[in-house]
Image (cartoon, rainbow, N blue to C red):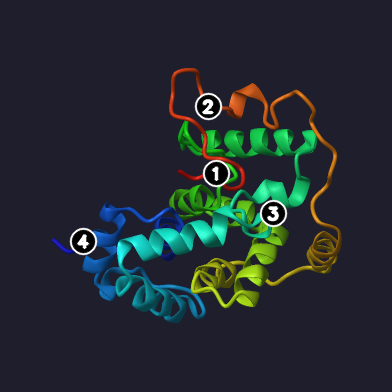
């Protein structure tokens, strides 16, 4: 029996996570024919990234990942940070995301915030109908800000953000205006103070694995 095709966004989700020996091995064994039919230039962009990824030693992949995503706020893969900063509005946005996953029967991992882009891509690949794509599109300004920063840095990971964008509708005028405003001003600076930046409902459970940091801090 032929293996089930790999959704392009599911593959992008895996490749946008911290590289591990298991990930490295799985990618090395992946046959391009196993990738499901894609939209636009997704196949070309995935092939370009895989060519780069496969020939790098694991320690180089890990170092590049940390330097790319953990040490730069503008490339944080937690999308609501770009839109809401550390404001209380971000907590509400995280709750809505968790509820959207629950409505489709997907439980977000206890150790990860629901706005982590790889988690959202996995949801988009698994969710029936247009719900997943619509969720990504609502966070389009954040995706575009990360994508622009990756392109300016000439990062190989820019190919993966191009894969994501190629599966979304064209930008609306409102989205363009918000992207420009966020690029010029940055995320809101209202501080939550002593309250956690996300409500308890989306924070890790006591005794469970710790949440990944919003920005940086990877061991």
Q: Residue furthest top?
A: 206
Question: Crowding near pointer 2: few (<14 within 10 Å), some, many (20+)?
Answer: some
Residue wearing tag 3: 138
* Above-or-below relation of 21 to 211: below
Can see residue 7?
Answer: no
Q: Earlier in the sequence, mark 1 or mark 4?
A: 4
Q: Earlier in the sequence, mark 2 or mark 1?
A: 2
Which of discs 1 and 3 lies nearer the camera? The answer is 1
* Above-or-below relation of 125 to 51: above
Q: Quadrant of residue 88?
A: top right
Q: Earlier in the sequence, mark 1 or mark 3?
A: 3
Residue wearing tag 4: 3
- What residue is shown at x 56% (from left), y 47% (from top)? 116
Which of discs 2 and 1 lies nearer the camera? The answer is 1
Quadrant holding the N terminus: bottom left
Distance between the alpha carbons at the discs numbered 4 and 3: 33 Å
Which of discs 2 and 4 lies nearer the camera? The answer is 2
* Closer-to-camera residue (1/13): 13
- Return the x and y of residue 213 as percentages of the image width and height: 57, 40
Residue wearing tag 1: 217
């Amino acid at each position: 029996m032929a293996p089930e095709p790999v959704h392009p966004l599911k593959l992008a989700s895996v490749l946008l996570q911290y590289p591990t020996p298991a990930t490295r091995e799985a990618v090395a064994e992946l046959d391009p024919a196993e990738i499901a039919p894609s939209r636009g230039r997704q196949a070309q962009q995935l092939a370009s990234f895989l060519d780069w990824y496969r020939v790098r030693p694991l320690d180089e992949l890990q170092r590049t990942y940390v330097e790319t995503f953990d040490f730069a706020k503008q490339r944080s893969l937690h999308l609501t940070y770009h839109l809401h900063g550390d404001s209380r509005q971000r907590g509400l946005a995280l709750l809505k995301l968790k509820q959207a996953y629950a409505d489709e029967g997907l439980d977000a991992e206890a150790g990860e915030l629901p706005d982590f882009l790889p988690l959202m891509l996995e949801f988009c690949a698994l969710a029936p109908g247009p719900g997943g794509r619509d969720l990504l599109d609502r966070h389009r300004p954040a995706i575009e800000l990360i994508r622009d920063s990756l392109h300016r840095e000439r990062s190989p990971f820019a190919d993966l953000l191009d894969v994501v964008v190629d599966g979304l509708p064209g930008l609306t005028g409102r989205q363009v205006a918000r992207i420009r405003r966020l690029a010029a001003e940055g995320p809101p600076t209202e501080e939550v103070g002593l309250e956690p930046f996300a409500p308890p409902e989306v924070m890790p459970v006591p005794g469970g694995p710790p949440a990944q940091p919003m920005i940086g801090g990877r061991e």
